[in-house]
Image (cartoon, rainbow, N blue to C red):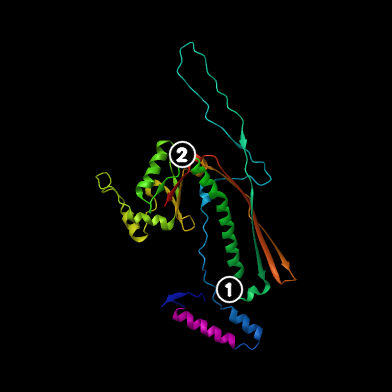
Amino acid sequence: MDYTLKIKGGQLELPTDQRKHFESQMKAAMQIADHGRRMAAVAAHVLGPIRKVAEYLEWTDKFFANDPARPNDVVRIAQDTYTAIAYMSSPDGQILYTRPGKSYTTVSWRHIRCGLEIPWDAGDWGWDVMGTKMMEAAEELARRRDEVRQPLLDAAAIGQAGHIPTVATTLTKASIDSIIQGAARVGFPITQVAVNIGRLMDQTSWALPANSMVSGVVPESYGRDLMTRLYFNGYGGLTWIANHTIPYDYLYLTGPASKIGWQFLDAVRGASETNIDRDVDKHNWRQNIAAHIEGSQWVWRLQVV
């Protein structure tokens, strides 16, 4: 039987039918004469630990196109400037020629490592120790990948004049509208936004213009979503990437990933060995990553101060 935990009066408890089944199984287990068999039977009904750390959700990967290059590959990214020129001329005027130059940049690989030791008796603890710890290892690998890519997004926005606006206290509709409009005006429209889910709930204070163009055509789902979720996902026709791991005081607004840059990800490789001196199994995972942003004109960062 699968057990379902419920919270009542601030305490965790099992539903009545499940509790009776659990108690009968525990009673039967304690009647087993052999101590080792008894402990194994009791452990089979141990309730696993309740997680106290929120799951880490990767988010910066949405801003980079994937490229199959690997660490042993020589990655060269061509550099170019807009050089073509057309001009008005008299019929006998001379042609002005422009010539592109050859220039490249490259990337620096970073190496992510994670190790885990599992005692031999972990299988008798009564809960999925290995599965839980492997999940944590996967989340930490994702956290480190974000730590490689986020500074590139910051540097790209800072390097463009006017691309790091600020707004006071709360996320406002006007601050989002200003960036969408400014990006569209220069030909690099915004298509996606990364925002902390708690910050996105600032939308509850947004007020739509009270004029004939807007009133009557606002989707009914807008009000329903604000009432039930405290945010409206889809404003401005943008893809809103919202979770709790995105920095609370920053929003990242960009064009499509294919216009921004690349990420080069080696496959996650794992290895295991048994340590007979310490009675543990050792596991490790490793991954190589590199990333590069070329289209910084597509990247904006809004700060709420």
Residue at (66%, 75%) from the top-left corner? 121
Judge from the rendering whether residue 47 lies leftward or rightward of residue 274; answer left or right: left
Residue, disc 2: 161
Which segment is the magenta one? 14-30
x, y percent for residue 118 = 66, 69
By secondary structure, the bulk of the magenta-drawn segment is best described as helix
Closer to the observer: label 1 or label 2? 2
Residue 110, above or below 138: above
Q: Residue at x 69, y 70 (%)?
A: 280
Quadrant assignment, res 127: bottom right
Q: Name the residue at 59% across, 57% down.
A: 141
In the rendered view, would you say 145 is above or below 137? Answer: above
Q: Secondary structure at mark 2?
A: loop
Q: Which mark is residue 290?
A: none
* Residue 61 position in % (x across, y down): 53, 50
Residue under label 1: 127
Amino acid type, label 1: Trp
Label 1 sits on a secondary structure element that is loop
Counting residues from the start of the chain, the first of labels 1 and 2 encountered is: 1
The picture places residue 30, in percent across and down from the top left corner, at: 59, 87
The image shows residue 90 at horizontal and vertical percentages of 45, 12
Q: What amino acid type should be assigned to the residue bearing mark 2?
A: Ala
Q: Residue furthest right?
A: 277
| Distance from Cα at disc 1 to Cα at disc 2 | 54 Å
Q: Is residue 37 magenta?
A: no
Residue 190 relative to residue 106: left or right:
left
User: Crowdedness of circle 1 by 10 Å Cα count: few (<14), some, many (20+)?
Assistant: some
